Image (spheres, rainbow, N blue to C red):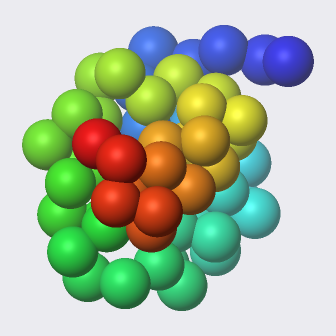
């Protein structure tokens, strides 16, 4: 699994991660954006989104 410096580097290198992010509800995207430096792979993005969608921050 490739790691990136932050979510922005992830989006630049993996367009599918950006597409996934863009389809998430606004409140989930807002929460993820507050921790952009902590999201360093597509896997971590998916896990974080899943946790937020379940309501377990």
Residue 37 higher or lower than 12, as above or below: above
Residue 35 higher or lower than 37, as above or below: below
Frontmost residue, 21 versus 55: 55
Q: Position of residue 21 (x, y in %)?
A: 51, 67
**The N terminus, quarter of image:** top right
Relative to residue 35, is residue 9 drawn left or right? right
Q: Residue at x 22, y 34 (%)?
A: 35
Visible in this render: residue 13? Answer: no
Frontmost residue, 35 versus 15: 35
Q: Residue at x 31, y 67 (%)?
A: 28
Quarter location, residue 26: bottom left
Q: Position of residue 19 (x, y in %)?
A: 64, 74
Q: Residue at x 64, y 70 (%)?
A: 20
Q: Position of residue 24 (x, y in %)?
A: 47, 78
The residue positioned farthest toward the right in the image shown: 1
How many discs appear?
0
Relative to residue 9, is residue 57 drawn left or right? left
Quarter location, residue 37: top left
Visible in this render: residue 55? Answer: yes
Frontmost residue, 14 versus 23: 23
**The C terminus, quarter of image:** top left
Q: Residue at x 66, y 56 (%)?
A: 17
Residue 28 higher or lower than 24, as above or below: above
């Amino acid at each position: 699994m490739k790691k990136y410096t932050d979510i922005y580097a992830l989006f630049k290198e993996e367009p599918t991660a950006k597409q996934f992010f863009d389809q998430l509800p606004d409140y989930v995207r807002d929460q993820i954006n507050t921790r952009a430096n902590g999201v360093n792979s597509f896997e971590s993005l998916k896990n974080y989104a899943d946790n937020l969608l379940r309501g377990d921050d």
